[in-house]
Image: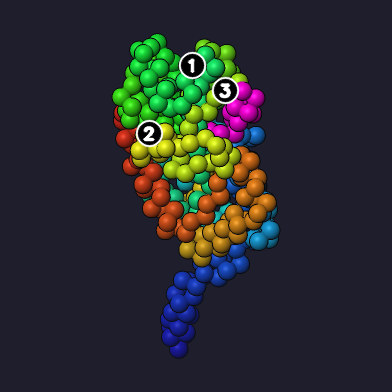
Amino acid sequence: MFRTSLLARAALAACLLPALPAAQAQSFPEKPITLVVPHSAGGTSDILARTVAAEAAKTLGQTIVVENKGGANGTIAAKQVATSAPDGYTLLLATASTHGINPSLYSRISYDAVKDFTPVTLLATVPNVLVIGKQVQASNVQELIAFIRSQGDRINMGSAGAGTPGHLAGEMFKSAAGLQFTHVPYKGGSPAITDLIGGQIDFMFTTIPGVLPQVKAGALRALAVTSPQRSPAMPDTPTMAEAGLAGFKAVSWHGIVAPAGTPDAVVARLNQALGGALASPAVKQRLMEEGAQASGLSTAEFGAFIQAEIAAWAKAVKDSGATAN
């Protein structure tokens, strides 16, 4: 009888084990959630993360604490989250760099953008904009192309750094238009924008928020955005496709991913809360002020989106010759 009792208890325990994760998921979250942002505080990524997190926290009933961890094009933050417990309490603000560019840019990378993460949702897309200094004799993209061809390799394109979305957008432009120019990488977007205004470089691709005040003030000219549709932040600025480069797309983006193995019910709960936050008119307005367009995808859709981004950026990385170790 004693042995039978033991066997019965063991069988009961085995039946209950699969139910434990489900029960834990139903009560999720029971404590604050940490959202790791792979950039410093104050930038577009940080503002976007804090805006959406604050709204989603209302639905979840727990605070979402934003932790800024910049460096190495986002690889440090990505590795931290990839090796965290898969319980939904540590999330990553995935970007076009961490989950689009880095897999091709780095010959050795400390995480797998697909295998080490569970997609939650895409938060927003942020188009880049092609801007030129006042010294450049062009009022549209085709005139800029003609100007670059007339000057040979004396034209300089700035960027926030080698392998950044702005740099690779420039390489796409070079390939699409058959151009030659010199790439000048900076340590961040701000010094590049300063030199663009000062005439040390001639043009650059960068996110809208960083140059919108200068464009409005007339210090810089915006020629085109790199998204398939016009940006609400710059409704009068055409797309690169409208400017004559069909199919041109180089969009920065931000999404949420969790460590691989995070329970499906937890991921679904996060997706629902974040989707609700993105539907908020106040959140949409704040994101638009940052040049971002609210998105929101299912986990499966976001997973497919990441796979497509890795493939698209791989060609740009190869064409640019950019590498990182």
Q: Position of residue 313 (x, y in %)?
A: 37, 37
Q: Is residue 121 visible?
A: yes
Helix, strand or loop under label 1? loop
Task: Indicate the secondary structure of the residue bearing disc 2.
Answer: loop
In the drawing, what numbered circle is on residue 136?
Answer: 1
Residue 316 lies in quadrant: top left
Spatial separation of the CA atoms under disc 3 and disc 2: 21 Å
Q: Please indicate whether residue 101 sits to the left or right of residue 74 in the image.
A: left
In magenta, the rendered stretch is 207-218
Q: Residue furthest bottom?
A: 1
Q: Nearer the viewer, residue 127 or 29?
A: 127
Q: Is 311 in the magenta? A: no
Q: Quadrant of the N terminus?
A: bottom left
Identify the residue shown where x is 43% and y is 79%. Answer: 11
- State the predominant SS element of the stretch in magenta: helix
Task: Please rate how many residues cluster around mark 3, counting C-alpha atoms within 10 Å: few if below 14, some from 14 to 19, many from 20.
Answer: many
- Amino acid type of the residue tagged 3 in the rendering: Leu
First along the sequence among labels 1 and 3: 1
Amino acid carrying label 1: it is: Val
Tag 3's secondary structure? strand
Query: Is 303 located above or below residue 315 in the figure?
Result: below
Residue 29 is labelled as none
Q: Quadrant of the C terminus?
A: top left
CA–CA distance in space, label 1 to label 3: 10 Å
Query: Residue at 42% across / 58% down in the picture?
Result: 300
Question: Could you say where residue 208 lies in the image, as x and y percent from the top left?
Answer: 56, 34
Which dot marks residue 220? Answer: 3
Which residue in the structure is indicated by mark 2? Answer: 244
Residue at 56% over, 66% down: 24
User: Badge 2 local density, few (<14 within 10 Å), some, or many (20+)?
Assistant: few
What is the spatial separation of the Cα atoms under label 1 and label 2, in whole angstroms? 19 Å
Which of marks 2 and 1 precedes in the sequence?
1
